[in-house]
Image (cartoon, rainbow, N blue to C red):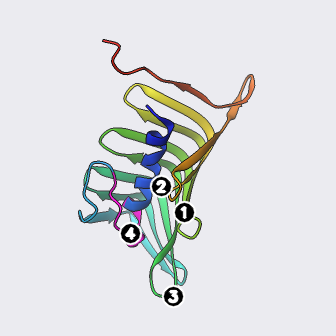
């Protein structure tokens, strides 16, 4: 599994969570698939709106779930920032990402996942404390999480074709 492919799922999270973000396709579904959302409560504020309690956004086979998802909007109602808080999960048909918090800033094209970050594709797993991924440039960086040996990024990758 390439880091680029694994990190690409975070870009898909932006497309999934932000229908106004553009016409890019997220893995496993078409960009024009309906986007469904739900939560225990919906809060509308001058800055945007929030899904609170079992917050979930789905599109095709992709799902973003967290305890709370805050969406910040501009004067025209376009989404400028998404923040998912509290055991954040993003699941596609082939990949899973988990963290304590995730933010996507449409102005900088950056997705930041923090906390106990875990990226998985099949048996391949990468762990760290902070992931920054740029949707536009498709580049990313994982910072280490605290371990007994100091802050470290860790992973296990299984080569393809070893049958």
Q: Earlier in the sequence, mark 2 or mark 3?
A: 2
The residue depicted at 55 percent of the width and 26 percent of the height is 155
**Disc 2 vs disc 4: which is toward the camera?**
4
Q: Secondary structure at mark 2?
A: strand
Q: Secondary structure at mark 3?
A: loop
Residue 133 visible from this viewpoint: yes
Which residue is identified by label 4? Answer: 22
Does residue 132 appear to the left or right of 24 in the view shown?
A: right
* Quadrant showing the N terminus: top left
Q: Are marks 1 and 3 in contact (CB under 8 Å)?
A: no
Q: Earlier in the sequence, mark 1 or mark 2?
A: 2
Q: CA distance from mark 2 to mark 4?
A: 26 Å
Which residue is identified by label 3? Answer: 75
Q: CA distance from mark 2 to mark 3?
A: 27 Å
Residue range in magenta is 16-26
The residue depicted at 57 percent of the width and 70 percent of the height is 107
Percent x, y of residue 98 = 49, 42
Percent x, y of residue 61 = 26, 50
Which residue is identified by label 2? Answer: 67
Residue 89 visible from this viewpoint: no
Q: Secondary structure at mark 1?
A: loop
In this orientation, which residue lies closer to the viewer: 116 or 151?
A: 151
Does residue 125 appear to the left or right of 33 in the view shown?
A: right
Q: Earlier in the sequence, mark 4 or mark 3?
A: 4
Residue 109's tag is 1
Q: CA distance from mark 1 to mark 4?
A: 12 Å
Q: Is 66 located above or below residue 5 in the figure?
A: below
């Amino acid at each position: 599994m390439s880091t680029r492919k694994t990190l690409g799922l975070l870009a898909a999270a932006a497309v999934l969570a932000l229908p106004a973000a553009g016409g890019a396709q997220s893995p496993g579904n078409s960009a024009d698939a309906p986007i469904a959302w739900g939560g225990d409560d919906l809060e509308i504020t001058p800055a945007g709106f929030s899904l609170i309690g079992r917050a979930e956004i789905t599109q095709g086979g992709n799902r973003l779930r967290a305890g709370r998802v805050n969406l910040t909007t501009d004067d025209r109602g376009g989404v400028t920032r998404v923040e998912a808080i509290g055991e954040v999960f993003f699941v596609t048909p082939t990949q899973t990402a988990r963290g304590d918090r995730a933010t996507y800033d449409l102005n900088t094209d950056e997705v930041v996942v923090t906390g106990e970050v875990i990226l998985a594709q099949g048996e391949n797993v990468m762990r760290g404390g902070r992931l920054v991924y740029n949707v536009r440039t498709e580049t990313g960086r994982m910072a280490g999480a605290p371990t007994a040996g100091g802050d470290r990024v860790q992973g296990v990758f299984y080569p393809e074709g070893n049958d």
